Image (cartoon, rainbow, N blue to C red):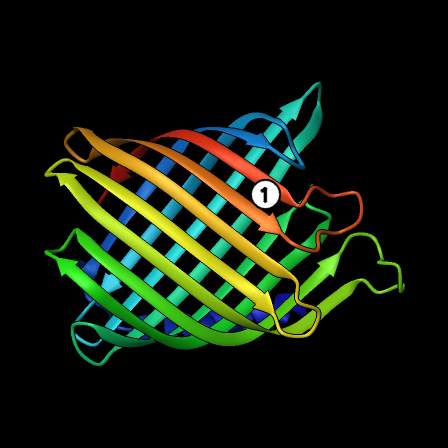
Amino acid sequence: MGLKQATAITAILMSPLAGADAKDWEGEVELGVLKTTGNTEETNVNGRLGLVHEVTEWRNIGNFRSAYSEAQDETTAERYRAELETNYKFDEHHYVFLRGSYEDDRFSGYDFQSSSTAGYGNRFLNWGERSFLDLSAGLGYRYNKLEVPDDDGNREEEEAIARLAAQFDFALSETSLFRQKLSTEIGLDDNNVITESETSIQASVVGNLSLKVAYRVEHVSDAPPDSDDTDTETSLSLLYGF
């Protein structure tokens, strides 16, 4: 069910991109070193691909992340994550969104986690192309599968959710950018709350190549058995924009 849901979400979110002109795309490839604490405590390699497609009425965003490490021929961290979002813009500030995410983290206590939400967003502040504040709120559905059954013998978590999110981008200079992202998904049935925060600074090194430092925290209020409720990541990466 989770895989089918993720496939459907992907198809819906990518549909506005049909026939898109290449000049409307921007992207970045990131590769770096990641220090984690929580369910995995070590240093590993992480990678990310980010894509943005924007025209007058549509803005489409995709993020694909992975992290992997191995010690003594044994996998010690393995995580894959995909996030897709499409926005229909009524004007410069107001938009509605449809968003889907899917995560497979081998050491999180979940077999996989997925969610889909729809709602309203507002770009309250906009200082040129690189500085803005986005706030959004919506309702949706979460479907997770546990690696180990809970106390009631269930391996599936299904519930309606409310999602609140914010993103603040501020251009410190022509070659540097500060970014703060914050989101929370609140379960409307069992009140499980998943909150994520990511703070980053990136600065141009030469040409399209930048250096990025980021700190990410994820907190799960009702974590699976034998799993920590808080994970942190500190990363140092090289980022290539195109």
Q: Is residue 232 left or right of residue 133?
A: right
Q: Residue at x 44, y 69 (%)?
A: 99
Q: Residue at x 72, y 60 (%)?
A: 145
Asked which secondary structure carries label 1, the reply is strand
Residue type for callout 1: Arg
* Callout 1 crowding tier (Cα within 10 Å): few <14, some 14–19, many ≥20: some
Question: Residue 183 location, x and y as percent?
Answer: 45, 58
Q: Residue at x 50, y 51 (%)?
A: 196
Whether 5 is drawn above or below 144: the answer is below
Q: Residue furthest top?
A: 72
Question: Residue 228 location, x and y as percent?
Answer: 70, 41
Q: Nearer the viewer, residue 116 or 75?
A: 116
Q: Which residue is mark 1?
A: 79
Question: Residue 217 location, x and y as percent?
Answer: 51, 42
Q: Quadrant of residue 222?
A: bottom right
Query: Which image quarter is the N terminus in?
Result: bottom right
- How many labels sit on residues? 1
